[in-house]
Image (tube, grey):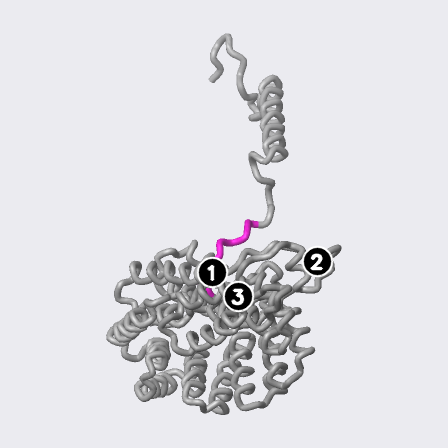
Amino acid sequence: MIIPGKKPLFHKDGSQNAPFRIVALILTILILLFILRSINTGTIPPFFLPTSTPTRTFGSYAAEGETQFTAGDLGKAIEAYQQALRVDSKNADLWAELARIQIYSTKLLTTDAARQTRFDEAKKSIDTANTTSPDSSIAYAVKSFYLDWYATSGLAGDQNQALLNQAEQAAVKALQLDSQNTLALAFYAEVLIDQQKITQADQNIKQALATDPSLMDVHRINGFLMESVANYPQAIAEYEQALQISPNLTFLYMSIGVNYRKILQYELALENFAKAAKINEALGVKDSGPYFSIANTYIQMGQFFSAGLNARKGLNYKPDDADAYGQLGMIYFKSRNYEGAIPAFKCALSGCTAQESCDVRQCDPTTDAMPAIQGLPLTTSTGDYYITYGSDLAAMHTRSNNTCQEGMRILELARKAFSADEIAMKNIIESENICISYGF
């Protein structure tokens, strides 16, 4: 029907009137222009683009972390587990595994400050695991591991025995929650070794081996047990078994090297220390430890020149690390380079200028870093440096250099810290008597 006075919208053949077609076309063009403008400005994403990268699951990050741990890159392993926990922050197992790797990573750190920081991070991780899942056996097992390693790290002071007791309690709690928890059995054995309860430790580690012999930790701790009873060949065999499971963990090569050195197989010791150094270089890890171990091995072989070269190489890996200067001082002292040991110890304990640190390292000031060094405080782990430095200063005293003046100050600090240590006091008194003979 056609309404009078109105033009039909459609013709009888169904086509639209021309004016309407023009309006529709203009609107379509405007809409297309709007869409194109939005795409160009980023308001609307372009059509047919590939979909964005899928969100990774915590499982993929955890798998990456385990791969990096096996590869020996503990820094990247820690980062991967931290990423996993950003996806699933309530997963107690992930927190426990992060803490386990953080504890192991303290083996790659040389200064008390760095190790303390890492232990603090591990404690935070394990506390979160315990809070997230109060009945998690694995969380208590790793808590035992943390308490044991911190107790024996030299950082715990007079809390050593109290922490070992807490470590034992945590291991017992883990086994009460799951009597077949292999890691709990192994970490309990390690605590018992440190408590000198060797028979009980042997029972636990044998049970762990029977439960799951595929774990690196189990063979590492059995190696530690064998080492503690001076069965060095069997200790080496167990550490090597651990390496078959996790083939790039440098601290295992270091343990093997130490045990070969104890049975006077120096070439095999050097070979394993060198493997640790090579893995670190491949991973970009600047760990001076293997080079100082090589240096100490050369000292036992009577090759003092090679010892000095490797010690300086280790120091140049971390030219701002005061502890490394202390290690160099010890290497020089054992090598009978008493004069060279003094400036190295000075940097380590009293601090030194950038030029003095460069002189100790025999660096090239035009290309090498030249940091000033802040001295280390007197602690359990730096006590040997202080006592040896004091002894060196006393032995090297002359009327012209007057080294006993500084020597008596250093020895007095050591005396106050180690008055209850019979062996330390014997060395301190002998050195003091030398200076006393000169009128100090």
For residue 288, side relative to residue 142 (left or right): right
Residue in front for this viewpoint, 421 or 426 = 426
Q: In this figure, which residue is indicated by the disc labeled 2?
A: 368
Are the residues flagged by discs 3 and 1 in contact, CB closer than 8 Å? no
For residue 167, side relative to residue 253 (left or right): left
Q: Is residue 53 magenta?
A: yes
Tag 2: amino acid: Asp
Between label 2 and label 3, give the one nearer the viewer: 3
- Name the residue: 71% across, 62% down: 363
Tag 1: amino acid: Pro
Q: In this figure, which residue is indicated by the disc labeled 1?
A: 377
Disc on the earlier residue, 2 or 3: 2
Residue 148, picture quadrant: bottom left
Mark 3 surroundings: few (<14), some (14-19) or many (≥20) residues within 10 A: many
Q: Position of residue 348 (x, y in %)?
A: 55, 62
Disc on the earlier residue, 3 or 1: 1
Mark 2 surroundings: few (<14), some (14-19) or many (≥20) residues within 10 A: few
Residue at the far right: name it: 366
Q: CA distance from mark 3 to mark 1?
A: 16 Å
Mark 1 surroundings: few (<14), some (14-19) or many (≥20) residues within 10 A: some
Q: Give the answer, above or below, for where 82 lies relative to 72.
A: above
Q: CA distance from mark 2 to mark 3?
A: 31 Å
- Name the residue: 42% across, 64% down: 98
Q: What number is the disc on residue 407?
A: 3
Looking at the rendering, the stretch of residues picked out in magenta corresponds to 51-62
- Name the residue: 58% across, 61% down: 347
Q: Is residue 74 magenta?
A: no
